[in-house]
Amino acid sequence: MDSKQQILSAIRHSAVPSAKLPTLTGPWITYPDKTRQFLDLVTSVGGRPVVVPDIAAANVDLHQFAPYAGAKRIFSNVAGMGDNNVNLEAVTDPHELEDLDFAILPGDFAVAENGAIWVTDRALTQRVVYFITQHLVLVVQADQILDNMHQAYARLAFPEAGFGVFISGPSKTADIEQSLVVGAHGARSLTVYVVG
């Protein structure tokens, strides 16, 4: 028997004691002002949070945002927001979106604990939109901000195969020469509109 087989055999015959799974009930972190906590966390991870009373006010702010003003290709999946000029239904190859400047998409809910927003591809034919756009806008309702990730995981449901991800801040990395680079692998900016 060679050394590889000896190692694999030893692993197969090792008895690992079972461990009791932790309970998911408990005094998880909560915040007296979930919205303020969420806004602070979005800011701390490089995002631009904006509280607005309604979509009309969000649209006014959006049109004053410099990256939006200079955008040529815009996709909006939020009614009443943005000047949508990209027909996602006609896109058959995600590479056709390589020059997408701006994407405006709804978030299902947000988490105050880490500034993350849960998004899915339920209303999208190309989920790459979240990651290929230069500037990303997510819109979330104020009453959909949860305290912590335990509450968030309780909300997740996949009745069928699908895609979902938590997004927190614009893309960034500090691997390159130990300096922070924003937009290295995805959106260069993230604006979050908290509506209501």
Image (cartoon, rainbow, N blue to C red):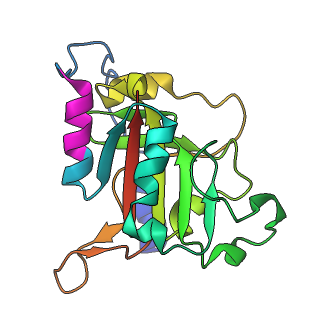
Which residue occupies 33% across, 55% down? 169
Residue 70: percent from left, percent from top = 48, 75
Viewer-closest of 125 and 138: 138
183 to 193, vertically: above or below: below
Indicate yes or no whether the magenta region holds residue 24.
Answer: no
Looking at the image, residue 53 sits to the left or right of residue 37; the answer is right
Q: Confirm whether residue 128 shows in the render.
A: no
Which residue occupies 34% across, 31% down? 149
How many marks the image carries: the answer is: 0
Could you tell me which quadrant the C terminus lies in?
top left
The residues colored magenta run: 33-41
Quadrant of the rendered image containing residue 176: bottom left
Residue 47: percent from left, percent from top = 30, 55
106 to 126, vertically: above or below: above
Residue 157: percent from left, percent from top = 59, 27
175 to 92, vertically: above or below: below
Which residue occupies 71% across, 65% down? 86
Residue 60: percent from left, percent from top = 45, 49
Quadrant of the rendered image containing residue 16: top left
Q: Confirm whether residue 27 shows in the render.
A: yes
- Main SS of residues in magenta: helix
Looking at the image, residue 64 sits to the left or right of residue 28; the answer is right
Viewer-closest of 192 and 124: 192
